Amino acid sequence: MQTDISWLIGGPQGSGVESAANIFSRACAAMGYNIFGKREFYSNIKGEHSYFMVRVSDAEIHSNVSDVSIMVAFDAETIFRHYTEVIENGAIIYDSDIAQSSADEIHTINAEYKTKLISDLGQKPTVQNALDYAKNNGVKLYPVSFKSVLSNMADELNNPRLKGMVRMYNVLGVSFSLGILKMPPQTLMESIDAIFSKKKAIAELNRNAANYSYNFATAKFSDFTFTLKPTEKKPGMIMVQGYQGTALGKMACGCRFQPYYPITPASDESVYLEANEIIDVKENRPGSTLVVQTEDEISAIGMTIGGALTGTRSATCTSGPGFSLMSESLGWAGINEVPIVITLYQRSGPSTGLPTRHGQDDLLFAIYAGHGEFPRIVYASGDVEESFYDTANCFNYAEQYQLPVIHMMDKFLASSVVTCRRFDTEKIKINRGKLLEKIVPDSNYKRFALTEDNISPRSILGLENGIFWNTGDESDEQGHITEDPELRMRMMDKRLSKLDYVLKTMPDEEQAVSFGTAEICVISWGSPKGPILDAIEMLKSQNIKIGFIQLKLLNPFPKTYLGFLLKDVKTLIDIEANHVGQLGELLKQHMQRVPDYYVLKYTGRTMTSTELYNSIKDIIEKKAQKRQVLTHGA
């Protein structure tokens, strides 16, 4: 029988929710299970509701589901936010000291949500009311006084320091969970050691707490039906957090300079690069990536352009507000044909919007950002594993075609924790295009030479005999400013024709990926890939065949190849995480085809495969309107 469990842990921001999830995920991955985890949190440092949901399965998975098998709650708000999500025969492990807490006491619950609680639970809703509601739906309740457990443990271990260590509630919650799941305790201890490997004393405290609470749970709560037993561990699997895919990809493909300005959710990538600046490259050659925190995003992209002009593979990473500030310099890179990569981690806008939440709001912005007309590639990854390889491709594209490349990521991908195949650096091929190592004297080098393929030989700053000029103005072949109308036309044609050349020379499988076509077909881009694949598998188990096309190249738009893939599709479903269906707008513009249905989500929360399964099923059964809006998630 297949094992598929969803575990949710929640508490106030800053209470150790993420550490707990990392311990739980590591322990399950060590047992051979596949992991998909996602973190949700408010844009404050401490206090607001934070939770982490981890799906554990012995089958291949690509997303979260909407239902919860086990919930661990340190605080009252977690109960109030998620009590309806726990499935029949699932479990709620909660701090018994909060049972009488009232919703009126929790200032972070707004009036709209309080109205829902009153509708479900009565005029003065308490945690106990919510627990009773869940119990009536077949949920098992496991009350534990976290404070008493710490106190008893402190007495038993003769360590009075433990009595007031509220921060250890997270480890207690994990250990109670793995205890009722009857997982072998050794994997829990190894996971704790890995998380606190640089803090031996803290690791020992947490091991003691974990051991005590694990034994407490197995002795007191032995009636839970779900179990996690060791399963066969597939070779070559790793557990990574989303932003590590692009960071490691940059290291592997020779990115050696990344200026950035801190902004969620992009900062994690640069911080990870900073922590791993010195790396080993083949044949014992040392390599390093210089990471510089700048004063703002304007400076970050300016330094990135400067680095690229020296011949160094250079990138920056940002989110929507930061990318807005970069748009003028993006045009400068465009007119000067400078190969840079911008990793754009989308979040919900506009303005500051939802700074720690998910969205795919920036597709059209990325394609059209900057005044005037200049070429750029906009490319999107659909999961953490492919983001590693896509990152290398993006640097190759930038240098082959000599233009800016905007690599679209998002908060969903950045904050996901997944098991996937180990990244294979042997698959990374570096193509630096027409980069010159030397120039023959007196060869009259022209940086912007008009060539047959419209890609000019590229000199770098300081290369002997390779002098050239850069300016924000229109220029001639050497880079000198010109306003000659005929030369202006030739230079504009040269630059913009690169987009046709991209479509002609980029392999079809790098433009779009078909996961099978059918009369009913889903089309999407970026992070909905995972939930879509899992939803299609759920439909497949009911003998319902659905096609799926994942667009990766979004500018220039691959209309010829996409037209081939869509030729037999009768019902087209556009799925994306924005309000207007931005991919649908591109389909109308380039293909003169309007999606038959839109499935959209713009709450700032990520899609689940459960939501998509239900939406696609409604479409198949003719129960759906043309536009469906998903709302799941606290």
Image (cartoon, helix red, strand yellow):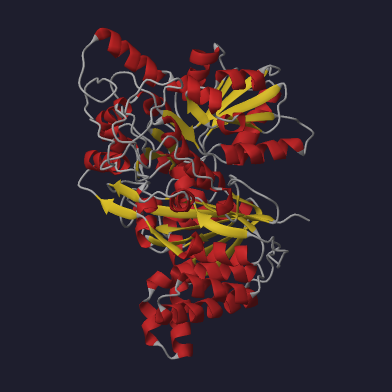
Which residue is nearer to you in this view: 480 or 51?
A: 480
Mark yes or no: residue 359 visible: no
Q: Residue at x 68, y 61 (%)?
A: 235
Quarter that holds the N terminus: bottom right
Which residue is nearer to you in this view: 407 or 597?
A: 407
Residue 5 location (% of width, % of height): 64, 55
Vertically, is 412 above or below 325?
below
Q: Is residue 356 left or right of residue 525?
A: left
Q: Residue at x 32, y 57 (%)?
A: 46
Which residue is nearer to you in this view: 521 or 599?
A: 521
Vertically, is 485 above or below 427?
above
Vertically, is 130 above or below 380?
below
Q: Is residue 182 left or right of residue 254?
A: right
Residue 80 location (% of width, % of height): 46, 51
Residue 450 location (% of width, % of height): 37, 20
Which residue reaches farthest front? Answer: 442
Which residue is nearer to you in this view: 463 or 36?
A: 463
Q: Is residue 146 left or right of residue 478?
A: right
Which residue reaches farthest top? Answer: 485
Q: Residue at x 58, y 47 (%)?
A: 64
Vertically, is 399 above or below 184?
above
Instruction: Using the rendered view, name the quadrant where residue 498 is placed.
Output: top left
Residue 537 location (% of width, % of height): 71, 39
Which residue reaches farthest bottom? Answer: 158
Mark yes or no: residue 546 visible: yes
